[in-house]
């Protein structure tokens, strides 16, 4: 468990700053790594159980973070007064494990599109847990993105697969991960958040993997390492991004991950998005672009008000 003593002054997290465009840029970058991790996980799902894939992922994650676990190391990061780390680690593991399970049944683009409902969850949760103010226009933009997801999935038709529930639940767990990240971002260093997430994740999944163990080949191990490295880098960037903007502003830009998984899905699995997927993607992109536009307008208005002279001057 985290130590009860507060971290030393030299290890305090940097204060959060309102720089949403830097946060947006980091979120966009993170989708490249996270998309690569997801596609590789789908590739491995044909030979390894989802729990074992998640175990390899979190084992690599923990190995990367090992220097931050060693007392006396200049990177030591386990001094923390927070107890949200356990919840974040469990939510992150749950999101990963449930999503990988869905990949065994669904095309990668469809699974990813379903998981993009997470911004709607984030927008709702950010009001309750972060006290963020979300205007009607941002709600509408988020709803448009969600409509795009439904266009891709077409629930109620023969094109809908019941396994779509897996990425949907994964999206809820991922939204919880993002909310917890934001809650800790003002008091915890990114390396501390990442280190505890790796410890919690590998501890939980290590207790489960013996029940489904399949001896991996060297080929499986190499791709498992790729999953671990790509997902760790992607998660690190996400933690950094949430220092610069509200969760409800940044979350819709995770939609761009659909582009990367669609390209990789075509190159690796020969999956070609149909016209419905393209139409739904158009809704998703429009949602993200409009959210960025509203953020520019909001910042411009705040700057204008700040520059106006006081009536009592």
Image: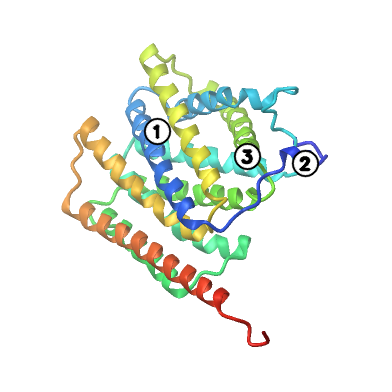
Indicate the secondary structure of the residue bearing disc 3. helix
Residue 26 in the image: above or below residue 229: below
Q: What mark, if any, has residue 9 been given in the picture?
A: 2
Mark 1 falls on what kind of element? helix
Q: Residue at x 59, y 55 (%)?
A: 17
Question: How far apart are labels 2 and 1 at the CA level?
Answer: 36 Å
Tag 3 and tag 1, C-beta contact below 8 Å: no
| Pointer 1 residue | 37
> 34 or 118, which is in the foreground?
34
Asked if the residue at tag 1 contacts the one at tag 2, i.e. Cβ–Cβ closer than 8 Å, the answer is: no
Query: Horizontally, is 34 left or right of 286 in the view?
Result: right
Quarter of the image where the C terminus is located: bottom right
- Judge depth for marks 3 and 1 and give the one in front: 3
Residue 106 image offset from top left, x and y in percent: 30, 41
Q: CA distance from mark 3 to mark 2?
A: 17 Å
Residue 193 numbered tag: 3
Which residue is located at x 52 percent, y 24 percent? 60
- Are there few (<14), some (14-19), or many (20+) residues within 10 Å of tag 2? few
State the separation of the CA atoms marked 3 and 1: 20 Å
Residue 274, image x and y in percent? 17, 49
From this viewpoint, which residue is outermost toward the right?
5
Residue in view at x 40 percent, y 33 percent? 37
Horizontal relation, residue 75 to residue 109: left or right = right
Which tag, 3 or 1, sits closer to the chain's start? 1
Does label 2 or label 1 sit earlier along the sequence? 2
């Amino acid at each position: 468990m985290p130590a009860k003593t507060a971290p030393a002054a030299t290890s305090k997290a940097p204060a959060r700053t309102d720089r949403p465009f830097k946060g947006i840029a980091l979120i966009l970058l993170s989708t490249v790594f996270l998309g690569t991790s997801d596609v590789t996980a789908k590739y491995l799902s044909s030979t390894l159980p989802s729990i074992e894939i998640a175990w390899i992922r979190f084992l690599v994650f923990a190995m990367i973070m090992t220097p931050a676990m060693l007392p006396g190391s200049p990177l030591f990061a386990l001094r923390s007064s927070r107890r949200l780390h356990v919840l974040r680690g469990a939510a992150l593991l749950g999101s990963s494990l449930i999503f990988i399970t869905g990949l065994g049944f669904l095309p990668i683009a469809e699974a990813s599109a379903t998981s993009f409902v997470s911004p709607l969850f984030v927008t709702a949760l950010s009001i309750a847990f972060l006290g963020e103010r979300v205007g009607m226009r941002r709600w509408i933009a988020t709803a448009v993105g969600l409509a795009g997801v439904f266009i891709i999935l077409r629930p109620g038709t023969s094109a809908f697969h019941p396994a779509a529930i897996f990425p949907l639940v994964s999206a809820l767990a991922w939204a919880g991960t993002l909310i917890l990240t934001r809650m800790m971002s003002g008091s915890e260093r990114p390396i501390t958040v990442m280190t505890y997430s790796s410890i919690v994740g590998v501890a939980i999944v290590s207790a489960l993997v013996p029940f489904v163990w399949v001896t991996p080949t060297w080929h499986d191990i190499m791709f498992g390492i790729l999953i671990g490295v790509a997902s760790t880098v992607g998660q690190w960037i996400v933690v950094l991004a949430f220092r610069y903007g509200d969760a409800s502003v940044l979350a819709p830009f995770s939609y761009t991950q659909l582009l990367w998984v669609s390209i990789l899905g075509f190159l690796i699995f020969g999956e070609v998005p149909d016209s419905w997927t393209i139409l739904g993607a158009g809704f998703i992109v429009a949602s993200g672009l409009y959210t960025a536009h509203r953020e520019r307008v909001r910042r411009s208005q705040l700057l204008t008000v700040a520059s106006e002279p006081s009536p009592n001057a």
